[in-house]
Amino acid sequence: MTSPSTPIVEIRNLFKSYLRSSQRVPVLEDITLDVADGEFLALMGPSGSGKSTLLNLIAGIDHPDSGLLRVGGVEVSALSEGELAAWRAAHVGFIFQFYNLIPVLTAFENVELPLLLTPLSRKERHEHVALALRLVSLEDRMDHRPGQLSGGQQQRVAIARALITDPTILVADEPTGDLDRESAEEVLGLMDRLNREFGKTVIMVTHDPRAAEKARVIRHLEKGLLNHVPA
């Protein structure tokens, strides 16, 4: 556990590169970043700037080449693949641009999925799912499959699924990129509420300045380098 003065995310001198043919291409260079507990951070930058790579490292989807990455007091950069998978399941809620819902499952069943790996009873799982869907104002759509829902509704189901395990951090990669303006505003309003009313730490990658306005801190990546922009 972290103390109130300790950042929920601590990154020091982080480097990440990828191998392209026989050439190593740097993506992130000497990144140092703190994210306070309960913060809403937007990572912005042009395509190829490294913002999604940085988000994936924070979420434990990928390993850095070098440097320190600590989330909630856990040194994520030192975990094995198996340890990372278990850590992600318990501590990270994912919100993707294209929802990643399973088409043959209802909204209720999609949200319930992460809980199937927990020791909760069926009754307890159902109580948790009902609460999460009520939080995103979709309790009247719980029996609908993704194809019966609008894009904004599907994204709200995805947010409920991300919240269901009460994760340490919520990570969102272009969460409004596939939505019309009205639906995008609804989703951003919900994320803002989760941050302000429920104290959820949100880290969002976006290229949309309107989306970034919801954040309290904006950091800008340019060619793998991090700059600070006050929100």
Image (spheres, rainbow, N blue to C red):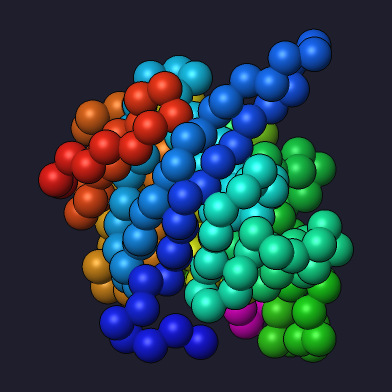
Q: Position of residue 22 (x, y in %)?
A: 80, 13
**Camera-side residue: 60 or 18?**
18
**Camera-side residue: 4 or 163?**
4
Q: Position of residue 202 (x, y in %)?
A: 39, 58
Q: Can residue 47 be seen in this view?
A: yes
Q: Quadrant of residue 89?
A: bottom right
Q: Is residue 206 above or below residue 189?
A: above
User: Given the current orientation, which residue lies at the most extreme top position?
Assistant: 21
Instruction: Describe residue 222's horizontal placement relative to residue 146 as left or right.
Output: left
Q: In which quarter of the image is residue 208?
A: top left
Question: Which residue corresponds to the image point at 44% horizontal and 29% vertical from the top-left?
Answer: 224
Q: Is residue 8 above or below residue 44?
A: below
Instruction: Describe residue 170's horizontal placement relative to residue 82 as left or right.
Output: left
Instruction: Based on the picture, tell me whether residue 127 belongs to the magenta stretch.
Output: yes
Q: In this view, does 202 lie above or below 197?
A: above
Instruction: Describe residue 182's horizontal placement relative to residue 136 as left or right.
Output: left
Please give the range of residues in magenta.
Answer: 126-130
Q: Can residue 141 be seen in this view?
A: no
Question: Which residue corresponds to the image point at 29% horizontal and 41% vertical from the top-left?
Answer: 219
Instruction: Describe residue 195's horizontal placement relative to residue 214 as left or right.
Output: right
User: Given the current orientation, which residue lies at the most extreme left position?
Assistant: 230
Q: Is the magenta stretch mostly helix, strand or loop?
A: helix
Q: Where is residue 163 in the image (x, y as percent from the top left)?
A: 54, 66
Q: How many marks?
A: 0
Q: In which quarter of the image is residue 86?
A: bottom right
**Camera-side residue: 70 or 88?**
70
Instruction: Based on the picture, tell me whether residue 7 belongs to the magenta stretch.
Output: no
Question: Which residue corresponds to the image point at 81% horizontal and 86% vertical from the top-left?
Answer: 119
Q: Position of residue 205 (x, y in %)?
A: 42, 38
Question: Which residue corresponds to the image point at 66% horizontal and 43% vertical from the top-left?
Answer: 65
